[in-house]
């Protein structure tokens, strides 16, 4: 399955986990890696280019660190610009129907923090619900997210293993 991984990290050069994931994914022949902040540091998005990338792939992955309980700002801008009426939704907006959407999220906090009674008293499933609603609205199949918790305390080996698990997860049937 042709997979497009859209990496959304505003400080990728200082990242450990997301940079490792991205570099590992680039080694896969059936995975296209697209660094959104590298491509559009000024938030001026080439809509036609982005739409063509989406058309060329069956599985779309948004890879990002959790920032203030959401994704980095450029992803919202990308959604607003690229997922247009008549293309992604509305009359004639069927271009993404049947494609898959998956999130690959890194989180500094522990998994136990993201549950009822935890530090944040909310689950990741609840936090990412807007992505699920968007996927449903534009006719995509929303897949369970790949999450890596506790990224601030991972060893180099843990980060490497996380990247391998991500590759396996993206290649699996869901």
Image (cartoon, rainbow, N blue to C red):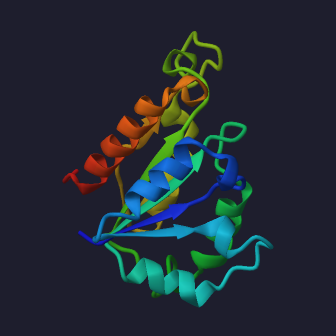
Q: Is residue 41 left or right of residue 31?
A: right
Residue at left offset 46%, top offset 57%: 23
Q: Nearer the viewer, residue 43 or 11?
A: 11
> Visible in this render: residue 115?
yes
Residue at left offset 40%, top offset 55%: 24
Quarter of the rendering occupied by the N terminus: bottom left
How many labels sit on residues?
A: 0
86 over 64 or under it: above or below: below
User: Which residue occupies the extreme top position in the image?
Assistant: 117
Residue at left offset 69%, top offset 47%: 14
Q: Nearer the viewer, residue 11 or 126?
A: 11
Q: Residue 93 appears at what percent x and percent y?
A: 47, 82
41 over 127 or under it: above or below: below
User: Which residue occupies the extreme front position in the image?
Assistant: 156
> Visible in this render: residue 95?
no
Quarter of the image for residue 61 reads bottom left
User: Which residue occupies the extreme right position in the image?
Assistant: 42
Q: Is residue 77 left or right of residue 24?
A: right
155 over 130 or under it: above or below: above
Q: Residue 97 appears at what percent x and percent y?
A: 35, 73
Quarter of the image for residue 9 reads bottom right
149 over 43 or under it: above or below: above
Q: Residue 140 appears at what percent x and percent y?
A: 38, 65
Residue at left offset 58%, top offset 12%: 118
Q: Residue 50 appears at what percent x and percent y?
A: 55, 81
């Amino acid at each position: 399955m042709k997979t497009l991984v859209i990496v959304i990290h505003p400080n990728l050069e200082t990242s450990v986990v997301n940079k490792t994931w991205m570099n590992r994914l680039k080694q896969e022949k059936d995975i296209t890696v697209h660094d959104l902040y590298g491509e559009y540091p000024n938030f001026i998005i080439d809509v036609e280019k982005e739409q063509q990338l989406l058309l060329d792939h069956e599985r779309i992955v948004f890879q990002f660190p959790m920032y203030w309980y959401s994704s980095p700002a450029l992803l919202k801008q990308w959604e607003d610009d690229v997922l247009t009426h008549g293309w992604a939704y509305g009359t004639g907006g069927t271009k993404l129907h049947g494609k898959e959407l998956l999130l690959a999220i890194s989180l500094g906090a522990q998994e136990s923090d993201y549950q009822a009674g935890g530090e944040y008293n909310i689950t990741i499933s609840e936090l990412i619900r807007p992505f699920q609603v968007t996927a449903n609205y534009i006719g995509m199949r929303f897949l369970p997210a790949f999450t890596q918790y506790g990224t601030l305390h991972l060893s180099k080996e843990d980060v490497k293993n996380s990247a391998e698990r991500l590759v396996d997860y993206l290649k699996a049937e869901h």
